[in-house]
Image (cartoon, rainbow, N blue to C red):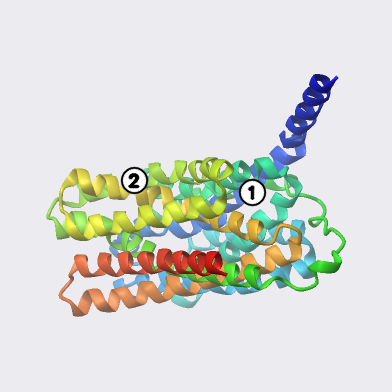
Amino acid sequence: MSTDRTQTSSAHAAAAASLDRSAWFATIAGLCGSLVAIGLARFAYTPLIPSLIEAHWFSAGDTVTLGAANFAGYLAGALLGRPIAAALSNRQALRLLMAMATAAFFACAFPVSIPWFFVWRFASGLSGGAIMVLVATSILPHIPVARRGFVGGMIFLGLGLGIAASGTLVPELLRFGLQETWIGLGVLSLILTAVSWFGWPAANPPQPAAHPSGHHRSAKSEWSLRILYGQYAANALGLVPAMVLLVDYVARGLGRGADIGAAYWVIYGLAAIAGPVISGYVADRIGFGAAYRCALLLQAVAAALLAASGNWIVIGIATVIFGVCTPGIVPLALGRIHEILPHSHVEQRAAWSKATTGFALFQALAGYGYSYLFIHTGQNYAIIFLCGTAALVLALLGDALFSLKKHKS
């Protein structure tokens, strides 16, 4: 009798952890959303910069400024994502944001003026920031707890695909011309928007009734969230050096040439494809908190390797680690929020919005700050990578000190 009960219980658990048709459609929609509004809208711009300058669409300075418009829009989107969803519903907001990102690709095919281009690059960044806030928190509450690591990884797989496409698809499209490349990206985005259109969950996440003891967060939860916000912001400081300088470091810093530098970027992109899936797989087995600490440690080691060695194998190892972690930390940070606030989807979304905003802010600050430091240190790559290492080590130390304090109390 007990054996039958055990088997029945196991069968119910397996059924609860399986993904039904609507869950799969929602997962695919989430992947399309992150690919269009973040993967392509942000990372596809980098390989387009030389062509924009060579085609005399804009000067070199204006081209860089227009690139920064996406970061500014991303920060605005992180702040506005929740209000937009509150006004429209999650499903309608995500559809609108996908359409906005798609329209931006087509609009950028026509260099009408600098303000025109700036507005559309800002709009693409805004859609990316808002989608980052909304996409997972709209889908994961409808997913069995045991499969949230996997689904979170699949949703943010789009970031990795976008990074890979920036090094592979965009150069191929550029063979047809710069305007045709923007239109091609727009067509791809339009197809992905259509695929995702009916996949978004129709209803906002169900909110369970509040428990009497749940009106106020515990001091432990509050401190855990603060530590996570700090870690995620510091993670932005640690990632930016590799995101911005890796190719230039290999090509000019080590004198290997642009082709070898581009080859490392392709490696970075291929690793990024696997990053969210690997992160989700590990988190499902050891927990999101432990998995995120491992990711911080690996990134700190990778940044230190870039600062200390010019060996091509060592750089390759560091490139793979950063490639995996660039998109991989996203589902880990989100999953950690769900661990800290397991019973309130409203609080989860608010916490994720704060974390995303902090990451966006420090990412933008890091971009400008490292650029200033790079210029005023005579283009010293090692110092920039060491700054990234220090930020990641501080994130780990903050977590370790909090754990020590928690055990003592």
Comparing 104 with 223, the one in front is: 223
Looking at the picture, how far across and down is residue 90, in whole percent?
75, 60
| Residue drawn where x is 70% and y is 45% of the image | 145
Furthest residue in direction front, as rendered: 408
Disc number at residue 354? none
CA gap, disc 2 to disc 1? 25 Å
Looking at the picture, how far across and down is residue 361, in whole percent?
49, 74
Question: Vertically, is 273 above or below 96?
Answer: above
Type of residue at label 1? Gly
User: Is residue 157 at least partly visible in the picture?
Assistant: yes
Kindly state the secondary structure of the residue where label 2 is placed: helix
Quadrant for the C terminus in the image: bottom right
| Residue drawn where x is 35% and y is 59% of the image | 243
| Residue drawn where x is 82% and y is 20% of the image | 4
**Nearest-to-viewer mark from 2 and 1:** 2
Which image quarter: residue 94? bottom right
Question: Vertically, is 49 above or below 354?
Answer: above
Kindly state the secondary structure of the residue where label 1 is placed: helix
Q: Which class describes the residues within 10 Å of circle 1: few (<14), some (14-19), or many (20+)?
A: many
Disc number at residue 320? 2
Answer with left or right where residue 31 lies relative to residue 384.
right
Quadrant for the N terminus in the image: top right
Comparing 54 with 15, the one in front is: 15
User: Is residue 117 at least partly visible in the picture?
Assistant: no
Answer with left or right where residue 247 lies relative to residue 292.
left
Looking at the picture, how far across and down is residue 87, in whole percent?
79, 70
Comparing 239 with 65, the one in front is: 239
Task: Tell me whether circle 2 and circle 1 mark residues in contact (CB < 8 Å).
Answer: no
Question: Vertically, is 351 above or below 9?
Answer: below
Query: What residue does disc 1 label?
Result: 30
